[in-house]
Amino acid sequence: MKSHARVVVIGGGVVGCSVLYHLTKFGWTDVVLVERSELTSGSTWHAAGGMHTINGDPNVAKLQKYTVELYKEIQDYSGQDIGLHMTSGMMLASTKDRFDWMKSILAKGRYMGLDAHLLTPKEAHDLMPLLDPDQFVGAVFDPVEGHLDPYGTTHAYAKSAKKNGADIYLHTKVEDLVQREDGSWRVITNKGEIIAEHVVNCGGLWAREVGRMVGLELPVLAMEHMYLITEDMPEVTEFNQTRGKELMHCVDFDGEIYLRQERNGMLMGTYEKACRPWSPLNTPWDFGHELLAEDIERITPELEVGFRHFPAFNKAGIKKVINGPFTFSPDGNPLVGPVRGMTNFWSACAVMAGFSQGGGVGLALANWMINGDPGFDVFAMDVSRYGDFATLGYTNAKVRENYSRRFSIRYPNEELPGGRPLLTTPIYDKLKAAGAVFGASYGLEAPLWFAPEGVEDQFSWRRSTDFDTVGAEAKAVRESVGLMETSGFAKYAVKGRGAEAWLDRLLTCRIPATGRMTLAPMLKDDGKLIGDFTLAKLGEGDFLLIGSGIAEDYHMRWFESHLPDDGSVTLEALNLSLVGLAIAGPKARDVLQKLTHQDLSTSAFAFMDVRRMDLGMAQAIVGRVSYTGDLGYEIWMKPQYQRYLYDLILEAGAEFGIRLFGLRALNALRLEKSYGSWSREYRPLYGPVEAGLERFVALRKGADFIGKEAAKAERETGGALRLRTFILEAKDADVIGDEPIYLDGEVRGWVTSGGYAHAAGLSVAVGYVPKEIADVATGWSIELLGDVLPARLHAEPLFDPSGAKMRG
Ligand SMILES: Cc1cc2nc3c(=O)[nH]c(=O)nc-3n(C[C@H](O)[C@H](O)[C@H](O)COP(=O)(O)OP(=O)(O)OC[C@H]3O[C@@H](n4cnc5c(N)ncnc54)[C@H](O)[C@@H]3O)c2cc1C
């Protein structure tokens, strides 16, 4: 065994072998994989081996596309047969709602160039005669689907990596990991020790245990999963003989089952409602190539639907039932990337669809390790999307929910109940008493809207029961004044003698003067956006940075890895030790003025001013800014003051008819102002010119901020895309995000977000299109739930285009 290696990959499942292969492919060949048993000894060996491209998240779909396209390459390069069967596939819907959902998935696929299309039940039956067409309302055909041999595939990755110079040590168990002073790792195995610059946790079923070796509790849990294999079926043989090909893959969403041909019979698997975690606290080290006891009763309800939808199964004998465990994160996406707070400790685990995603995960991680960047937008599977709130108990609740809903529709207005309520702010009960309907974001309950007595969200693709109330909330803000809670934003205190210089290097904006705020984009080296903040300078060496709540760990990882080591900057994610309220609307100043002796007139407290001030008896930080685009104030306070201030503001606002509003009204209001938001308009895919943020990129400031050279280049070339606002002729539904944008009937762009702008009375879509066509006046349309609707480019914000109201 080698005593030193640049990288030690822990785990020889499909994911570990893919990571190893990609590292060697990109030139890192001093790499080692250690496997406690044989390759495939975790969940990989008993997988059904199915793979497909389509995914609800376009960025994950891209990874899946890459994975499927990689298979021929590794088979050819390694000489190892991977048993590839590209059968094509279909997704089936038996309700109209489901079919609506499929149309939205199809529309997403369209701008990615996926070659999928709709089928009638009859067309579906022609392609797959085992199904009963009367049970379905339609289907989506996907040519890029199939299945393969898990063993052969894993070995093909491994052989390819070895061919490139990697070493693989079997029957070598990592027993401990100890970091040395120089940052390298002592990888302590039962066969000796390897000193490694980097360690990658591809432990699969044991990823949690490997994490614990370094003090990490990764949000990952294994679930039992069953599929059955039938005896030979005459219908299968007949199809094979008459058509000269295999039966295709099917996912039957309403039956919550998937099926494919297996030799001369069929394989059917379920994501059952009565799901069961496996080894919820610890994964036994002696678990290996054994299966779990079959438990057909648990999956009977799903099988009954499956057998009704595919009647040939009723006559088939069951040859085998496979029950094996595999791992999930709380949202079902992998946990990939560098772990915050650690040097060179990488995660590539919780990959629940290793044969659809393993290649993409390997690619992203190898890019990240070698180039410092995953090379594309991987936020959906970034290990940093979970903070401390994702405990073992939270993970258990969410994974069970996720597994049991794997084939369920999630409506755009549907908030899932698992693991909630977890984090709440001091005014939670008051908001609840006022009718708040909550959503959970980063573990925190946040009000979405305030429902009248007896009204609740009816889940739908179309406008729903909240429509009129959200409209009234938005209009109250525009016409008088509204109050909302803003505690869900991430808040960072940046202090110290080096704070200003550090922020100047990190952020693209000019550092504001004391008592002022500015918008502050943050770029990677390649000039793409990795953050958009509001930066407030409260005093010398005393800054408050406000950003997206869901990206707190993601941003902290970046901040911490760029902190100077001379102690001149201190950084703290304040989380719920600082909470917030915001008031907005033409009467906002009148309300606030009642609570303070300080002069709030524009000459004394202008737009983007920030100040510590007492409101009534409470200390607060008040910034004159509002994401609604109105005259407005963000008010930050210690949690112990929040109840008091909430009551005080409501009381002061009563004479102006102050109204509570939630995140849905906020979305409607910010759309009218064409304000972008993190993870939608602003992502590591786009540059600041493309995103319309170039005025906050101070190329001429003294500091050499990160991404400056790339930002200069983008300014010169103009980048490739432009963010644009469209008005859509929509009748009873609005866009959500990822719908295709057409110009003259051709897909040219994609929607990043949208909704109904209540105060303007218009349906709005915001999205990216190529810059060459970004100002074309006519010919636009946007696809919404299967209909292509005319759209009008809107050059300036619908609300207050001159900014007079917000500044006045
Ligand atoms: C019944 C069933 C059907 C499935 N069907 C499909 C399907 O059709 N399509 C699909 O894409 N996915 C399917 N899956 C999921 C798929 O199996 C997983 O996504 C995949 O196996 C994950 O691979 P992995 O490498 O992350 O983990 P694992 O396969 O669990 O590999 C982890 C490896 O790490 C090793 N290891 C752990 N700790 C240590 C240590 N300390 N030292 C040394 N080695 C260690 C283990 O021995 C193991 O070999 C299915 C799963 C099951 C259970």
Image: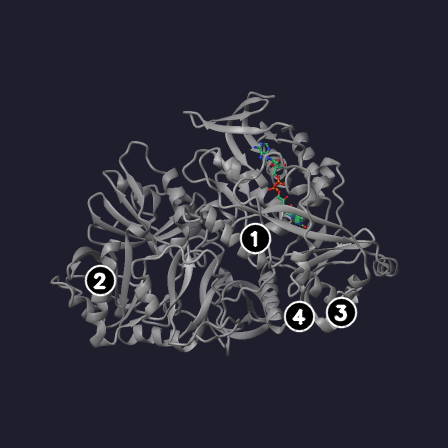
Q: Mark 3 CB in 8 Å range of ligand 1?
A: no
Amino acid type of the residue tagged 1 in the rendering: Val
Task: Indicate which disc, 2 or 1, sits on the residue closer to the N terminus.
Answer: 1
* Residue 98, position as x, y percentages in the image: 61, 69
* Residue 328, position as x, y percentages in the image: 56, 49
Q: How far, Cα to Cα, is label 1 from label 4? A: 26 Å
Q: From the image, tell me which residue sits under label 2.
A: 645
Nearer the observer, disc 3 or disc 1? 3
In the rendered structure, the answer to whether residue 293 lies left or right of residue 656 reads: right
In the rendered structure, the answer to whether residue 515 lies left or right of residue 155 reads: left
Which corner quadrant of the figure contains ligand 1? top right
Q: From the image, tell me which residue sits under label 4.
A: 94
- Which quadrant of the view contains residue 249? bottom right
* Residue 702, position as x, y percentages in the image: 29, 43
Q: Nearer the viewer, residue 784 or 339?
A: 339
Q: Label 2 near label 3: C-beta < 8 Å?
A: no
Q: From the image, tell me which residue sits under label 3.
A: 132
Amino acid type of the residue tagged 2 in the rendering: Leu
